Amino acid sequence: MVASEFPLTRLFLRGRLRHALTEDEKVLLESLIEGTRRVAAGEVIIRRGAVAQQSTLLLDGFIARVINDGASRHIVGFQVPGDYVDLHGFALKRLDHDVVAMGPVQIGYTSHARLERLMGEAPHLTRLLWFSTLLDAAIHREWILKLEELKADQRLAHVIIELWHRLNFVELADPHGFNMPMLQTDLADACGTTSVHINRVIRALRERGLLEIGRGRVTIPGMAELARYAAFSPDYLYGTGALQVVTELDANADA
Amino acid sequence: MVASEFPLTRLFLRGRLRHALTEDEKVLLESLIEGTRRVAAGEVIIRRGAVAQQSTLLLDGFIARVINDGASRHIVGFQVPGDYVDLHGFALKRLDHDVVAMGPVQIGYTSHARLERLMGEAPHLTRLLWFSTLLDAAIHREWILKLEELKADQRLAHVIIELWHRLNFVELADPHGFNMPMLQTDLADACGTTSVHINRVIRALRERGLLEIGRGRVTIPGMAELARYAAFSPDYLYGTGALQVVTELDANADA
DNA sequence: CGATACGTTGATCCATTTCAAGATTGGTGG
DNA sequence: CCACCAATCTTGAAATGGATCAACGTATCG
């Protein structure tokens, strides 16, 4: 472990607009984190409806946004290290969903009082915080699209590739996969299908040589093949360098 | 038509946090609108991937967020009067979806340069603008839930009740329905199903006496019955007075 | 009055759910 | 180190929601 310059916030907006942060802003951002905490797998970190006094930065591990509706459980989004998982709680005050640790997790937190002061003092950094909440919204829109458009096998592939890209931004993916604690049940809840069906879908994708999932590890033999299969295009993730992608999109739109 | 105090922005956050705006802020907000424009039905107001220089406030009519993926067309959200339809473009710069007029529409616009100045000068108003983009995200999450959880008939009912509530906030709904220009095709694209199937679903709901749709008009004989049918709970819309709802949720969570 | 967009209906096929049972795995105490 | 337990994963068979293809009805408007 190399001692990093900004040990807590170095992953925030990495691969996105981190380059838009000045050195002063990086210092300021790091100073926002008033404390850190370890959380056990499965723990509900923020409960739906509770009035939020602070916001949470995910430092290590995976988190899901979960809505429990009586019998059924649904996942409306995943968060990876470097994500502020409930920055929207700063303006919304109370969340419409639970925030749950998918495996063992480490988090940092920032009081809303501190964020309120920041808004008056650092408009540009504020705008980047705003941007980060809009990234979540863009991902939400893609999930809506995915659920409207794709079959279960493509949905799964889509979720997996999205996670790979997001982990790749923060240098937690390797060229052919990544580690993650999510179970088949979790993937089913995120794909809007049942664990029985997700199990068959996983097998089908394995047999096609597109994807392997098991024992906390995802292996993707051919990134391009899987992306094609899932009709995945990463522009909605607003990664650095995505402007080229958009140019391509424009070209296609004209055609 | 009564001459209103803030003719352009009087609907912004109405039924939500408009009461949190001071009189000065309301004046400032109104001054943001640098021009207005009428748009014909079906017109693409903002195209995916284009670099945005301004943001758009919907003054009158309905707008959809549309993603065209080759053959298929998908709607990832609707906007009603009083909504800033592309405020996220201020921070994201380019949108991941098209913004399309569902019927004849009137819009106002604000340059991003003006918004940038505002961020330094009016942090509290900025925070409310931020809030309004987070409302969209909350609605996105509910759509994800809806698509993961519900069958086509309940999805349709859910979309309709959501629109009723949002129109009710801005006083454009009446106790038993509202007017809207969306076609069966549009509703199908928003529910992730086909127009053939949405047609059957509309008939089934009509035969059950839950919902009538036709000729630009939605009629809801019994709001409570339809809400129960769609498993609809309006707390995610963050309407004024929703705190009671949340208290109920907490009570349920404990039970 | 004919064109065009929108809505309606029927028949067939397939993806997915549901229910039920069994296999595998990892962890824990004896 | 083994035996056992609980969680997770796997498989089968029957039932169903929804897609698809194809055709026909019906508004509406120049």
Image: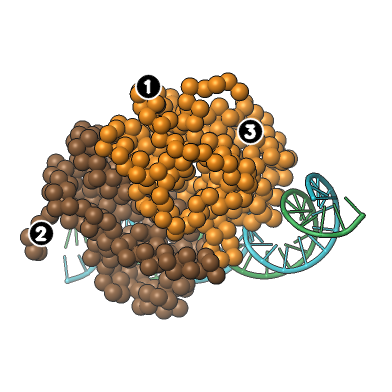
Chain colours: A brown, B orange, C green, D cyan
Question: Which amino acid type corresponds to the residue marked 2 in the rendered image?
Answer: Ser
Q: Are marks 1 and 3 in contact (CB under 8 Å)?
A: no
Quadrant where the image shows the N terminus of chain B: top right
Badges 1 and 3, same chain: yes
Q: Is residue A206 visible?
A: no
State the residue in front, A30 or D8: A30
From the viewer's perspective, tell me whether residue A67 is left or right of residue B184.
left
Whether residue B232 is situated above or below residue B191 in the rendered picture? above
Secondary structure beneath dot 1 equals helix
Residue pointed to by mark 1:
B23
Residue at 14 percent of width and 53 percent of height: A23
Task: Name the disc covering residue B178, or none.
Answer: 3
Tell me the subunit letter for badge 1.
B
Q: Position of residue B55 (x, y in %)?
A: 43, 44
Tell me the subunit letter for badge 2.
A
Quadrant where the image shows the C terminus of chain B: top left
Q: Position of residue A130 (x, y in %)?
A: 31, 45
- How busy is the neighbourhood of tag 1: few (under 14 within 10 Å), some, or many (20 plus)? few
Q: Position of residue D10 (x, y in %)?
A: 43, 70
From the viewer's perspective, tell me whether residue B72 is left or right of residue A176.
right
Residue at 47 percent of width and 65 percent of height: A250
Secondary structure beneath dot 3 equals strand
Residue pointed to by mark 2:
A4
Tell me the subunit letter for badge 3.
B
Question: Which amino acid type corresponds to the residue marked 1 in the rendered image?
Answer: Glu
Badges 3 and 2, same chain: no
